[in-house]
Image (cartoon, helix red, strand yellow):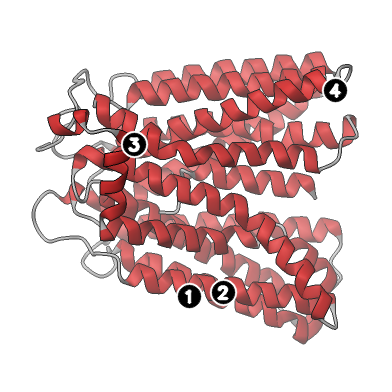
């Protein structure tokens, strides 16, 4: 591929098999993350009787470290290859995941020592997930043909969900009867298997070339490259889009189920099924975009910008419907509205990720990793802040609202407004350029930072 000598793949881009192999890295990443965000969270709160704030603060460290994503992307830009950064990140993630399990077991008898080790482990988890996730998406951005980007984003997301789906029940089976030793054993095995899968998945895909994409980029210091990226109007606009849309996406995570219980008198079991329904909608939306963009394509139905805007506006409409549902009472089709929200979220997410794969090379392939890192940092900060700000906004609104449901409705309305703003920003993103290198000319949320998004989701449901 012209201009990208370090990629080591054919000019036609990655094959479907190669894309699926890279998706296995997200499967491995998800397998480690699910133990940290759900199992360890539950053990700390239930078995150790610690305040829910403790695992919440530890997960917050994971998000705080995401601000270093631009530096990790720059590192791979400088050295020209992504595979070492992916493997190094997975090694750190797996070591951190095992360390977190050891810390939790240690806290049973030595709380202070266990919490100290947990802080180090969660920092390692954040660094590992950030380095591996960022550079995996950079590798995909440089190797996936334009027509396959929507489908590729869906494949990566679905395979990450598979990591959750397979690991959670298997780990749960072997954790009973629970003990600290069992927890460490299960976590250790999962971490070893996850790293082995990731290593085999990336083997040979990138090629052996190690020269940086542009000689000048190797000499430029990180601060100069970061300033260059942030000075690019398209990259800066996309950064704002990611932050605003992810803030809207994550703010509803911790308030949807309580709202359903207050406004519609749903039982805990019924509200839990809403979460599954929403995630099912997300998957349906992603599969729909993948099928249309890869199967039909064309200048209209193949436009990822169009699907991004449609997903944002659809999410806004669904949130407004949910907000107004409280006034309609039990007759309101809450399940249908939540499913519609999930579908719209899925459409927005997969289209935005596919768009980011193109925009990452816009302005110069030498800074592709740094750009992806900037967007990953924006996503991580927004997702980490969204859940907190959503719950804080509800508490503040309840001070003025006559009924609790009205406070939730006000926050859902505000989130809908954020999605509308995100749609307006997306309309200003550059569409794919005609001609030239398609891989470097297309105008994400992140499935990047998918692991972070699903990590927050798993943590939110476990905390409930």
Q: Residue at x 26, y 24 (%)?
A: 79
Q: Nearer the viewer, mark 4 or mark 3?
A: 4
- How far apart marks 1 and 2 lie (CA) works out to 6 Å
- How far apart marks 3 and 1 lie (CA) works out to 32 Å
Look at mark 1 in the image and give the residue it sits on: 420
Report if the CB atoms under discs 4 and 3 are less than 8 Å apart: no
Q: Is residue 204 left or right of residue 127?
A: left
Q: Position of residue 244 (x, y in %)?
A: 49, 63
Q: Earlier in the sequence, mark 4 or mark 2?
A: 4
Report if the CB atoms under discs 1 and 2 are less than 8 Å apart: yes
Report if the CB atoms under discs 3 and 1 are less than 8 Å apart: no
Dot 2: within a 10 Å radius of its alpha carbon, few (fewer than 14), some, or many (20 or more) residues?
many
Q: Residue 220 falls in which quadrant of the image?
A: top left
Dot 4: within a 10 Å radius of its alpha carbon, few (fewer than 14), some, or many (20 or more) residues?
some
Residue 416 circle label: 2
Q: Nearer the viewer, mark 2 or mark 3?
A: 2
Residue 111 circle label: 4
User: 369 or 258: which is nearer to us?
Assistant: 369
Residue 19 circle label: 3
Q: Residue at x 33, y 52 (%)?
A: 356
The answer, for residue 444, to whether it is visible in the render is: yes
Q: Residue furthest bottom?
A: 328
Image quadrant in which the N terminus is located: top left
SS class, disc 4:
helix
Q: Position of residue 262 (x, y in %)?
A: 84, 70
Q: Earlier in the sequence, mark 3 or mark 1?
A: 3
User: 309 or 147: which is nearer to us?
Assistant: 309
- How far apart marks 2 and 3 lie (CA) works out to 34 Å
User: 440 or 187: which is nearer to us?
Assistant: 440
Q: Is residue 62 left or right of residue 185?
A: left
């Amino acid at each position: 591929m012209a201009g990208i000598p370090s990629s080591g793949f054919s000019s036609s881009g990655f094959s479907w098999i190669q894309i699926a192999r890279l998706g296995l890295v997200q499967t491995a990443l998800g397998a480690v993350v699910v133990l940290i965000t759900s199992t360890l969270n539950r053990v700390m709160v239930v078995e150790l009787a610690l305040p829910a704030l403790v695992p919440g603060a530890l997960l917050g460290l994971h998000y705080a470290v995401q601000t270093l994503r631009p530096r990790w992307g720059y590192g791979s830009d400088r050295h020209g290859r992504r595979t070492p950064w992916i493997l190094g990140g997975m090694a750190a993630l797996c070591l951190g995941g095992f360390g977190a399990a050891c810390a939790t077991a240690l806290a049973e008898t030595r709380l202070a020592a266990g919490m100290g080790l947990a802080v180090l482990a969660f920092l390692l988890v954040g660094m590992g997930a950030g380095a591996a996730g960022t550079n995996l998406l950079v590798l995909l951005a440089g190797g996936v043909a334009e027509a396959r980007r929507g489908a590729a984003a869906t494949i990566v997301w679905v395979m990450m969900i598979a990591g959750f789906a397979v690991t959670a029940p298997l780990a749960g089976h072997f954790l009973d009867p629970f003990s600290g030793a069992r927890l460490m054993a299960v976590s250790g095995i999962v971490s070893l298997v996850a790293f082995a899968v990731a290593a085999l998945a990336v083997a040979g895909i990138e090629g052996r070339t190690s020269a940086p994409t542009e000689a000048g980029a190797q000499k430029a210091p990180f601060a100069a490259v970061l300033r260059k990226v942030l000075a690019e109007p398209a990259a800066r606009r996309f950064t704002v889009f990611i932050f605003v849309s992810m803030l809207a996406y994550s703010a509803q995570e911790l308030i949807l189920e309580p709202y359903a219980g207050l406004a519609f008198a749903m039982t805990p079991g019924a509200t839990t099924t809403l979460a599954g329904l929403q995630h099912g909608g997300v998957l349906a939306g992603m599969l729909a975009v993948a099928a249309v963009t890869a199967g039909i394509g064309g200048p209209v139905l193949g436009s990822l910008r169009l699907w991004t805007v449609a997903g944002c506006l659809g999410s806004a409409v669904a949130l407004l419907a949910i907000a107004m549902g409280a006034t309609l009472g039990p007759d309101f089709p809450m399940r249908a509205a939540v499913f519609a929200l999930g579908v719209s979220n899925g459409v927005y997410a997969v289209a935005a990720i596919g768009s980011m794969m193109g925009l990452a090379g816009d302005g110069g392939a030498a800074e592709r990793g740094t750009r992806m890192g900037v967007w990953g940092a924006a996503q991580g900060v927004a997702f980490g802040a969204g859940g907190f700000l959503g719950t804080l906004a509800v508490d503040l609104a309840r001070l003025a609202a006559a009924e609790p449901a009205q406070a939730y409705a006000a926050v859902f309305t505000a989130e809908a407004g954020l999605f509308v703003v995100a749609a307006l920003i997306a309309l200003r993103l550059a569409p794919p350029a005609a001609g030239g290198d398609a891989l470097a000319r297309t105008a994400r949320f992140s499935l990047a930072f998918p692991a972070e998004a699903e990590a927050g989701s798993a943590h939110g449901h476990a905390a409930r």
